[in-house]
Amino acid sequence: MDKLIETLKRHEGVKSRAYQDPMGTWHIGVGRNIHPEGSHQGVGLSEEEIDYMLSNDIVRTIKELTEEYPWFRTLDDGARRDGIINMHFNLGRYRFAKFVKAIAHMESENYDAAAAEFLDSLWAKQVKGRSLEVTDMIKTNTYV
């Protein structure tokens, strides 16, 4: 199996981002066909692969929050912490960091004000109901 994997990687290439082959078919990884439609329609991802990727993304998100925000390390496991993870997961490191006032409120444990700041944003308008649920989690430390 090791020799087969080595050969396939050499022949197919290893790509961490989606790419198109010369025929216009989309792939990722080691030749995984992810083309969305038509005669080239791909295999896509299994539920196990999706869950594995999600777990890795959550771990990365928590690591970024832990490294950047000392107040995040003090949050108890629970809805408030999960709300912050959810938001950061959605926005990414750089867009999340733009919430300067809300982050300052998180640091001072003023969760009502932080939630209000998060809600008063383009992000909240874009994600609609998600923003209400996430900010309620941050404000109350309970799940909806």
Image (cartoon, rainbow, N blue to C red):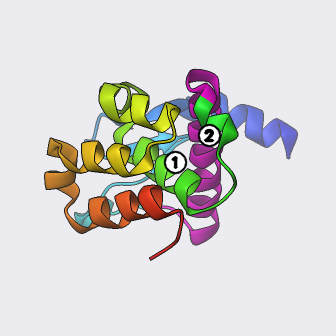
Q: Locate residue 88, reporting x and y percent.
A: 44, 41
Q: Is residue 56 magenta?
A: yes
Q: Locate residue 78, reporting x and y percent.
A: 63, 61
Q: Does the magenta stretch include residue 3?
A: no
Q: Quadrant of residue 24?
A: top left
In terms of secondary structure, what is the magenta stretch mainly? helix
| Label 2 close to label 1 by CB (< 8 Å) | yes
In the foreground, 108 or 4: 108
Residue range of the region highlighted in magenta in the rendering: 44-70
Q: In this view, does 33 lie above or below 10?
A: below
SS class of the residue under badge 1? Answer: helix
Q: Which amino acid does label 2 sit on?
A: Ile
Question: Is disc 1 surrounded by few (<14), some (14 to 19) or many (20+) residues within 10 Å?
Answer: many
SS class of the residue under badge 2? Answer: helix
Q: Locate residue 54, reporting x and y percent.
A: 57, 54
Q: Quadrant of residue 103?
A: top left
Q: Locate residue 39, reporting x and y percent.
A: 27, 65
Q: What residue type is labelled 1?
A: Ile
Question: Is disc 2 surrounded by few (<14), some (14 to 19) or many (20+) residues within 10 Å?
Answer: many
Q: Which residue occupies 41% across, 35% down?
A: 105
Q: In this view, does 86 lie above or below 109?
A: below
In the displayed structure, does residue 102 sit left or right of residue 50?
left
Q: Mark 2 points at which residue?
A: 62
In the foreground, 120 or 13: 120
